[in-house]
Image: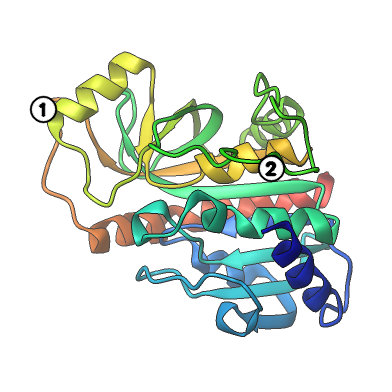
C-alpha cells in the first residue's frame, strides 16, 4: 500500500502547478465550497492512479488545486466512505497521499445528525473531539513510517485552529456550536435508540465519515480543523424521517457561512 501511496503522490507532483500546504475535504452537500476556490488544476479521481472513486450523490469526485483566502490549497470534492465497501486503508488513502505532497493542515467538513438537545437544524458545530465507532480501525495492520505505532490523540483537533475559528465567527456574527462528533459506519441513519445511546456516550452529533481521516492525519502529524453542519436532529421528540436529499438541502442552505469561516481561517493561518 505504501508503494501505491508514493506512486500516486509522484504522479500528482508532476501535474500540480503549486505546492499547497493546506487541504480541505468537502463533505455531503458542501461541495459548493469549491466555487470559492480559484482553481488552477482539476483532476478527476478516476484519472488518478490507485485512487478510489466516489459513489455517493453530492460527491463530485474531483481533486482541486487552486487558491482560497490567498493561499494555495488542495481540495477533495467528494470523499470515500466505509459503507461504500472500501476498506479503511482505501478510505484514508488520500490523507496518506496528502502527507507525501507536503500538506501540513487539513480542514474537514461533514453533515451530521445532532444529538445535543440545544442544537438546531442548520447549526454549525466546530468539532472539538470525536468518538470512533467504526468496526475497523484505519491504523490496523503494519505501521506506516509516517508516525508512531501508538499515536497520541489527546488533541485530534487543533486547539489553536478552533480558537481562530471562534474569533472569526464572533467577528462575523456567525453562530457556532462546539461538540463531539461520533463516527459510525452507516449507511443507515440512526434509530431513536441509537441516537439516545450515542448521546449517553457523550456525542453531540453523529455521521458516517471524518473520524478515519482525522486519525490518519494525526498519525502523519497533520493539524486538523473540523466542522459539522447539523442537518437533522436525533433528539427525543424531534426525530423525523430523513433522506439523503434532505440532508443535502439542509447542508446547502448554510454552507456559505461555513465557507466564510474556513476561507478566513485559511487566510489567517
| Mark 2 vs mark 1, CA separation in Å | 37 Å
Which residue is rendered at x = 83% and y = 45% of the image?
Answer: 268
Find the residue positioned furthest to the front.
142
Residue at the spot of label 1? 237
- On the rendered structure, is 244 left or right of 127? left
Is residue 117 visible to us here?
A: no
Q: Secondary structure at mark 1?
A: loop
Q: Is residue 86 above or below residue 12?
A: above
- On the rendered structure, is 232 left or right of 239? right
Instruction: Give x and y (percent) for residue 120.
Output: 31, 35
Which quadrant of the figure has residue 13? bottom right
Which residue is rendered at x = 21% and y = 22% of the image?
Answer: 196
Residue at the spot of label 2? 217
Which quadrant of the figure has residue 204? top left
Q: Earlier in the sequence, mark 2 or mark 1?
A: 2
Instruction: Give x and y (percent) for residue 110.
Output: 46, 49
Relative depth, front residue between 170 and 126 = 126
Relative depth, front residue between 81 and 269 = 81
Given this view, does label 2 or label 1 mark the residue nearer the observer?
2
Image quarter in which the C terminus is found: top right
Instruction: Give x and y (percent) for residue 17.
Output: 87, 79
Amino acid at each position: 500500500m505504501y508503494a501505491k501511496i508514493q506512486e500516486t503522490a509522484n504522479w500528482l507532483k508532476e501535474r500540480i502547478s503549486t505546492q499547497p500546504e493546506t487541504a480541505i475535504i468537502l463533505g455531503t452537500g458542501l461541495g459548493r465550497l469549491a466555487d470559492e476556490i480559484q482553481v488552477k488544476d482539476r483532476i478527476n479521481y478516476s484519472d488518478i492512479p490507485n485512487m478510489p472513486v466516489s459513489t455517493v450523490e453530492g460527491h463530485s469526485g474531483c481533486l482541486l488545486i487552486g487558491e482560497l483566502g490567498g493561499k494555495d490549497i488542495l481540495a477533495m470534492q467528494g470523499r470515500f466512505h466505509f459503507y461504500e465497501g472500501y476498506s479503511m486503508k482505501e478510505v484514508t488513502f488520500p490523507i496518506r497521499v496528502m502527507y507525501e505532497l507536503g500538506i501540513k493542515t487539513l480542514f474537514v467538513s461533514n453533515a451530521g445528525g445532532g444529538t445535543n438537545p440545544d442544537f438546531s437544524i442548520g447549526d454549525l458545530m466546530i468539532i472539538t473531539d470525536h468518538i470512533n465507532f467504526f468496526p475497523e480501525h484505519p491504523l490496523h495492520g503494519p505501521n506506516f513510517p509516517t508516525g508512531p505505532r501508538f499515536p497520541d490523540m489527546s488533541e485530534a483537533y487543533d486547539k489553536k485552529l478552533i480558537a481562530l475559528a471562534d474569533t472569526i465567527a464572533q467577528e462575523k456574527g456567525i453562530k457556532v456550536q462546539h461538540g463531539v462528533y461520533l463516527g459510525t459506519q452507516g449507511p443507515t441513519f440512526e434509530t431513536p435508540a441509537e441516537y439516545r445511546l450515542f448521546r449517553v456516550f457523550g456525542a453531540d452529533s453523529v455521521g458516517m465519515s471524518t473520524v478515519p481521516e482525522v486519525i490518519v492525519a494525526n498519525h502523519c502529524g497533520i493539524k486538523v480543523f473540523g466542522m459539522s453542519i447539523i442537518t437533522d436532529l436525533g433528539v427525543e421528540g424531534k426525530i423525523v424521517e430523513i433522506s439523503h436529499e434532505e440532508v443535502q438541502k439542509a447542508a446547502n442552505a448554510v454552507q456559505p457561512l461555513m465557507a466564510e469561516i474556513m476561507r478566513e481561517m485559511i487566510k489567517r493561518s
